[in-house]
Amino acid sequence: QLQLVESGGGLVQPGGSLRLSCAASGFTLNRYAISWFRQAPGKEREGVACISSGGGYRMYAASVKGRFTMSRDNAQNTVYVEMNSLKPDDTAVYYCAAQLRSTSCSYTGMNYWGKGTLVTVSS
């Protein structure tokens, strides 16, 4: 079964940090760009960060630039997003998604989606 599984979500205080993981099973991630999306209650889903298949290209939404950092370990078939200086506005369900492409990354045309992990930023 081909799937992506997110982990690492939870409750964190404002200013804190979390690292989310996105692990693939049933396929290898080294040919896929990976994107992170989030959806807050009552809001549309938005793309927040992505990384190319080789890791050499990264893109971040303005709302998280400088605070979120994506990385990938293709040997472990896992992609990460390190989230620092978290704010209450970062509260959302975070999803990872994979897109088969050889260069760059984007927030459209995803081939696989995870089921999400909840991040709550609150004191």
Image (spheres, grey):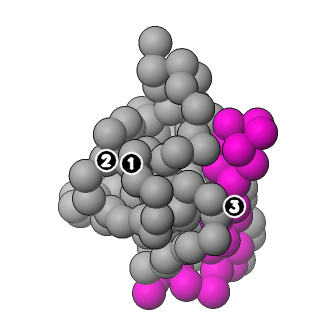
Q: Residue at x 32, y 39 (%)?
A: 111
89 lies above or below 72: below
Asked if residue 41 lies left or right of residue 85, the reply is left
Q: How far apart are marks 3 and 1 (CA)?
A: 16 Å
Q: Which element carries disc 3, helix, strand or loop?
A: strand
Describe residue 113's horizontal placement relative to residue 69 as left or right. Answer: left
Q: What residue type is labelled 2?
A: Met
**Image spot of residue 13 (x, y percent):** 69, 66
Q: Do the residues labelled 3 and 1 touch (CB within 8 Å)?
A: no
- Name the residue rendered at 54%, 64% in the picture: 51
Residue at image position (46%, 57%) is 102
Q: Name the residue under label 3.
A: 71
The magenta segment is 62-85
Q: Which mark is residue 99?
A: 1
The residue to which callout 2 is attached is 110
Sequence-first tag of 3 and 2: 3
Residue at 52% x, 45% y: name it: 31
Q: Where is residue 40 in the image (x, y as percent from the top left)?
A: 35, 59
Residue 12 location in percent, x, y?
68, 59
The amino acid type of the residue labelled 3 equals Ser
Depth check, front residue: 92 or 76:
76
In this rendering, the answer to whether 6 lies above or below 65 is above
Is residue 69 rendered magenta in the image? yes
